[in-house]
Amino acid sequence: MFASAAPHDQSELILTCLATGFSPKLTEMKITLNNITLQPFSSSGVRPNDNQSFQMRASVKIHRDEKQGYKCHVLHSGQTFTTTWDGSLESRSHHWAAVAAGAFAIAVLCIMSLIYKNRRFNERHHLLFVYTVLTKPDGVSGPVFSAVCLYDDRWISHYSNEEQTWNRDRFDPEIWRYTREPDDSRDWFINLLNTLANCTSSRCDGLHTLQRRVGCEVDKHPDGAVMNVNALDEYGYDGEDFLFFNYYTMQWIDKSPKAKETKIKWDSDRVHNHYLQLYLKDCMVWIATYNASISTPPALHMFASAAPHDQSELNLTCLATGFSPKLIEMKITLNNITLKPFSSSGVRPNDNQSFQMRASVKIHRDEKQGYECHVLHSGQTFTTSWDGSLGSRSHHWAAVAAGAFAIEVLYITYLIYKNRWLNGQMNRNSSTTEQRDNITSRSADPLTASDSHENNELL
């Protein structure tokens, strides 16, 4: 605690309490006089230091001649910390140290902002195989196994329980040249869940779930270069994290006490873990190949309409539609100067697995020259110009109709999902619970199988 002269009243002092170096950031502070809480006239709030800790400061105005009984109380992580002001007007080194730390933190935040500004132009993609397995208690009907392959928001392959094989929903030889579904069988997953849940093949008490997702995420830079960001193979059991594979150490990390036995068993299978690492490493190549083969450029349209409340203005709109993947950036310019949009739809789905985006700016009715729309998509810039006309807005209404249709499809899909969930059905849109994939076929009893590697197959 320290005090300084009030700038406009010599009879007052400004008494400040500074708490610094704490973590986590949640904290509460109050200054009291003889156990009566004083109302602060200034508070910094919680601010970051340069060492991943935090600081907070609060100040009250006091009479210069009243220097006894002032305390600062801080509640942090369930504990209360208290200090007392000694009444002196000595060094404010702590104050200036805090100021310096705050200035440094601001500089760090500015640098991070610049890094983010640079990174936001990158495209992030993921290729994931997602598995869900359910036990089948009495009274629950429907499939107990579901598996899909997802590229970003697109479903490109799924496992058919009727045919007991993978069906590729998008058939393109270039897409599947280096990409293939994992070898792990449906029965292997079901046997693993039965083992974890202490179920038999014919009876199980209660509903249990096993989830797995395996694949990778990458950043694609505007110049087309691909950088591997993350490779993963993760398991969840009954809605909680269970096991995940460390790509670099080729070890399994248990996230639940129930996973320890499985971890020991799978860690000993070093040949399989090596193959899994190679499989995940190839994932970056798969994404680069797949993205190149499915990238669909946007169609651009510009149109204008009368502003509803000002006859001297027009609303100029740029519409980009039919593109995939979904990451896109749009700007409208006047003579190469970027205009600030008053409205943006964001990226929305069409009904054919492509996307659309729309942005609008206000312009003067008599200024119809020099307007352009620029769109950055998959490392390429697409540009169109407004011809100054106030003609047909058919493109606009087509986009509205497509958007409305997409919303209707999504709503119907939601209703189907809700109904199937209540009946124990698997929903293909369970990508948000993503599952794991990509390991060689193991014995029908995953926890008691022999450590022999003779039958391991290359993924």
Image: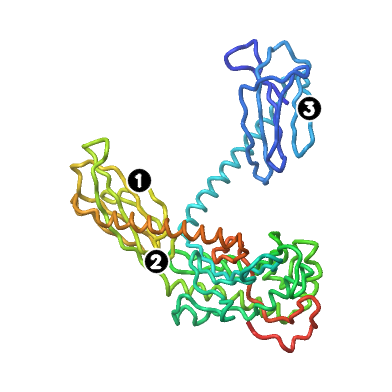
The quarter of the rendered structure image containing the N terminus is top right
Q: Secondary structure at mark 3?
A: strand
Residue 168 appears in the picture as rendered: yes
Q: Residues under labels 3 and 2: Cα distance?
A: 65 Å
Q: Which mark is residue 315?
A: none
Seen as rendered, the residue at the extreme bottom is: 454
Secondary structure state at the residue bearing disc 1: loop
Question: Which is in the foreground here, disc 2 or disc 1?
Answer: 2
**Above or below, 423 relative to 289:** above
| Residue type indicated by callout 2 | Asn
Work out whether mark 1 precedes mark 3 in sequence or the reverse, and give the earlier one.
3
Q: Secondary structure at mark 2?
A: loop
Residue at image mark 1? 341
Q: How many marks?
A: 3
Question: Quick one: 257 or 112, which is closer to the camera?
Answer: 257
What amino acid does circle 3 point to? Answer: Thr
Q: Residue at x 52, y 48 (%)?
A: 113
Task: Looking at the image, tell me whether mark 2 or mark 1 is earlier in sequence order.
Answer: 1
Question: Residue 352: which disc?
Answer: 2
Q: Amino acid at mark 1?
A: Pro
Does 339 sit left or right of 129 as displayed?
left
